[in-house]
Amino acid sequence: MTPSRAIIRAARARLSRALFAAAMKGYKRLMNTPTSPVRPPEQRPPWDTLLPIPRSLASERHPLIVGHRGARGLAPENTLPAFEVAAELDIDGVEFDVQRTADGVLVVFHDDTVDRTTTGTGTLADLTLEQVRALDAGARFDGRFAGTRVPTLREALEYLKTTRLLLFIELKDPWRFPGMEQQCVDLVRELGLGPRTQFRSFYHDALHTLYRIAPEIAISELWDDRLPADDEVTFKTVDAPHQLLTPHNIRHMQARGQQVTAWTVNDLERARTLAGAGIDGLCTDYPDRLLALFG
Ligand code: G3P
Ligand code: CA
């Protein structure tokens, strides 16, 4: 590549990262999403007590291949069939989202409302478990999955315990569900899944709560509109949208002792670039594609 081409390419990439970050910021403002500011150093967990990503039970692969919301390109997101697909592929792990019903039961679900992924309407947090369980969470994805239900977290964990998958559990909007951190920890501990779990959230106050109540379980900080600066380093894994990552900033974060994972990487060329940069994990809707690439 000629030097001028390389300069244009780098400028384009920088612009696209800046546009992505601005769009994310705008979206959060529009949705009125609360943020929790990075805590001062004296309030951060002692670095030596923090755990890295658990080791894969399935492979020595680097980067780890993690199915996003189970494997949402291949089966209805955040459902048992999606976890079954991931287990059959024998990838390294699954990422999934947790929220709580109006009557206090943790369920595996992504959106605020049930409208997009189920046959119902309304805000998930306003529905009882019985109402949520009456919904079909598979038919909209494909008629073959009709009759699939929204799983409770317990159900999901009981199934996942029978597999070799690592569990990347995202606490979705925990400010709306006071006490959900303890509920998640209790279930993970009861089923003995702590050693293969990593908790994660965009709302970092919840991560500090998780660390306080369950320091034996790994934690990842999620970022969406920017990456943490050197004086903000708090947890040992940074999970960020792949659009913000470059070989340079990946290596920089790793050099300061953090592991780096990316969401949601469905493009093989992009996966190859990130893997070449040494990224630790790739979260994808299509784990079958990444598996074909990395084996
Ligand atoms: O790991 C973070 C990633 O899952 C965030 O994206 O799909 O929950 O909106 P999403
Ligand atoms: Ca998620």
Image: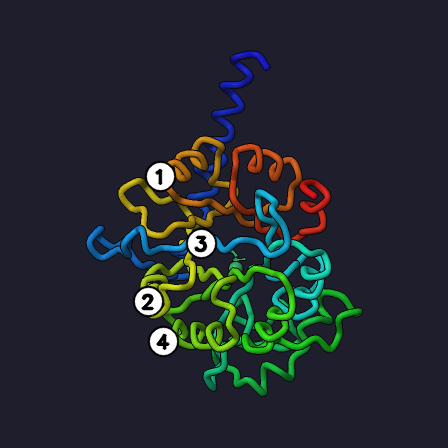
Q: What SS does tag 4 mark?
A: loop
Q: What SS does tag 2 mark?
A: helix
| Picture quadrant where residue 131 is located | bottom right
Q: Of callouts 1 and 2, which one flags the residue occurring earlier in the amino acid sequence?
A: 2
Whole-percent x and y of residue 90?
69, 56
Label 4 neighbour load within 10 Å: few <14, some 14-19, many 20+: few
The residue under label 1 is 256
The residue at the point 42 percent across, 55 percent down is 220
Whole-percent x and y of residue 256?
35, 39
Query: Is 96 placed left or right of 285 in the picture?
Result: left
Residue 209's disc number: 2
| Picture quadrant where residue 96 is located | bottom right
Q: Is residue 277 above or below residue 161?
A: above
Q: Of callouts 4 and 3, which one flags the residue occurring earlier in the amino acid sequence?
A: 3
The residue under label 4 is 178
The residue under label 3 is 27
Q: Amino acid at mark 3?
A: Tyr
| Picture quadrant where residue 122 is located | bottom right
Q: Are marks 2 and 3 in contact (CB under 8 Å)?
A: no
Q: Is residue 95 above or below residue 249?
A: below
Q: What SS does tag 3 mark?
A: helix
State the residue in front, 177 or 28: 177
Q: Amino acid at mark 4?
A: Pro
Choose mark 4 or mark 3, whichever is in front. 4
Q: Are marks 4 and 3 in contact (CB under 8 Å)?
A: no
Choose mark 4 or mark 2, whichever is in front. 2
Q: Of callouts 1 and 3, which one flags the residue occurring earlier in the amino acid sequence?
A: 3
Between marks 1 and 3, how big is the CA–CA gap? 30 Å
Q: Does the Cβ of the disc 3 residue fall within 8 Å of ligand 1? A: no
